[in-house]
Image (cartoon, rainbow, N blue to C red):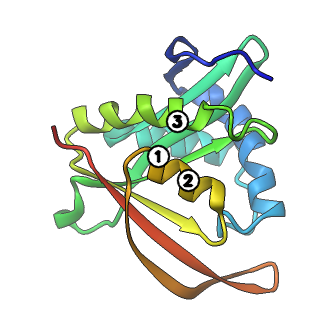
Amino acid sequence: MDALLTHDSIRDATVTDAAACAAIYAPYVTDTSITFELEPPSEEEMARRITEAQRHHAWIVMEDEEGVLGYAYGGTFRTRAAYRRTCEVSVYLERGRRRRGAGRALYTALMPRLAARGMRTAIACMTLPNDASLGLHRAMGFEDVGVMRRVGHKHDAWHDVAWAQLDLTP
């Protein structure tokens, strides 16, 4: 079991983290329906995403002595101007790192960064079934706000998507 993870192991991501983040994310793309992407993004694409997230939102990584073991970020929820203070959040961990506190630690560090950048609401979008993600978001105080039925098709199956939101204002 991993040692208790601390916030000392969490920092803002840079483009030099792109390869590690891409490697963590790739199995979610290829082996699960947790994300609706069909092709894993390249290191270059991941670097672009990190840069974009850092511009207006936040992207953080958790690392130990072996390197990056997970990341979380906030990004644009919708492109229309009225949504500019609302962001969509995600967290991804290396396989085998779930349910050890890393997701909670990443989100605990991420939410204040987003609030400091003017975000008022964080939105989470979760492909169902995904008990681990639902549990994490509920534990972090996200409120369930709805389920869209059979809206994503991946791995020869239709999937529901749950939505939850968290108020980031004091």
- Which mark is in front, 3 or 1? 1
* Residue highlighted by disc 2: 135
N-terminal label among 3 and 2: 3
Q: How far apart are the alpha carbons under marks 2 and 1?
A: 6 Å
Left or right placement of residue 8 versus residue 130 in this view: left
- Which mark is in front, 3 or 2? 2
* Residue highlighted by disc 3: 104
Q: Secondary structure at mark 3?
A: helix
Say which of 63 and 139 sits in front: 139
Q: How far apart are the alpha carbons under marks 3 and 2?
A: 10 Å
> Measured from the top left, where is residue 97 in percent x and y?
75, 35
Crowd tier of the residue under label 3, counting other residues whose Cα lies within 10 Å: few below 14, some 14–19, many 20 or above: some
Left or right placement of residue 151 versus residue 120 in this view: right
Q: Secondary structure at mark 2?
A: helix
Q: Amino acid at mark 1?
A: Ala
* Residue highlighted by disc 1: 139
Crowd tier of the residue under label 1, counting other residues whose Cα lies within 10 Å: few below 14, some 14–19, many 20 or above: few
Left or right placement of residue 65 versus residue 79 in this view: right
Compared to 69, does 73 lie above or below? below
Please name the residue shown 55% across and 53% down the image: 135
Q: Amino acid at mark 2?
A: Gly
Please name the residue shown 61% across and 31% down the image: 102
Q: Quadrant of residue 65?
A: top right
Q: Secondary structure at mark 1?
A: helix
Say which of 91 and 77 sits in front: 91
> Measured from the top left, where is residue 156 in percent x and y?
81, 85
Please name the residue shown 80% across and 23% down the image: 1
Q: How far apart are the alpha carbons under marks 3 and 1?
A: 8 Å
Whether tag 3 and tag 1 are in contact, CB under 8 A, the answer is: yes
